[in-house]
Amino acid sequence: MVLIVIPGPGVLFVVGRALAHGRSTALASVAGHSAGNYVLAVCVAFGIGAIVERSAAVFTVIRLAGAVYLVWLGIMAFRRRGSLARVLTEAAEPRGGVQSVREGFLVGVTNPKGVILFAAVLPQFVDRAAGHVTAQMLILSTMAVLIGMASDICYGMAASTVRSWFARSPRRLGLVGGVGGLAMIGLGVTLAATGGRRN
């Protein structure tokens, strides 16, 4: 639980989306991010995660892909910082919600912290003598994803509350968009620059 709650790429992504676009976008991003994490969990449960954990090259590709995507999202948020009022209106449209879920999913499925959690941490809690290892992994992963979802929602709600205070002034609103974008860019650069085994 402690490992999940510690801010990683997923948490900072959700916070950045909450600051840049508001509560509904943040919650949609949480849903997508959780779904992406669960895909990782299922892959680990059926053996794919073990391959990723053993291969430094595959792990690096996943880490860099997630970093590049975060930088791109951050650049887009920063470039649109002056038009957040329009973005807030569009956030209520179904297309915006679907797009946020898709973006969250891509961040979740390429999250190195998720790979480490599901491939290196959760297997330690499996009782191999009891059998049904895959089923045990799926149950443990489901619990981890639910804890992560609850944590992400709390972070997103807190960030969106701070954002509403800034949103009272158009100048503050632009500042929020810039900060949210820069936070994601910084996270992406840090993720690309640091070692793949750290988070």
Image (tube, rainbow, N blue to C red):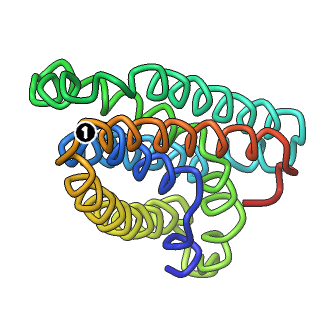
Q: Is residue 193 visible?
A: yes
Measured along the vertical axis of the image, is residue 180 above or below residue 100? below
Front-lying residue, 19 or 100:
19
Q: Is residue 97 visible?
A: no
Q: Residue at x 50, y 36 (%)?
A: 181
Viewer-side residue, 53 vs 66: 66
Q: Quadrant of residue 82?
A: top left
Would you call the spot at circle 1 few (<14 residues within 10 Å), some (14-19), or many (20 or more)?
Answer: many
Amino acid type assigned to the residue bearing label 1 in the image: Thr
The residue carrying mark 1 is 25
What percent of the width, then of the height, locates residue 37?
A: 47, 48
Q: Residue at x 75, y 46 (%)?
A: 190
At which x and y percent is residue 166? 27, 52
Dot 1: element: helix
Q: Is residue 51 above or below residue 95?
A: below
Nearer to me, 63 or 183? 183
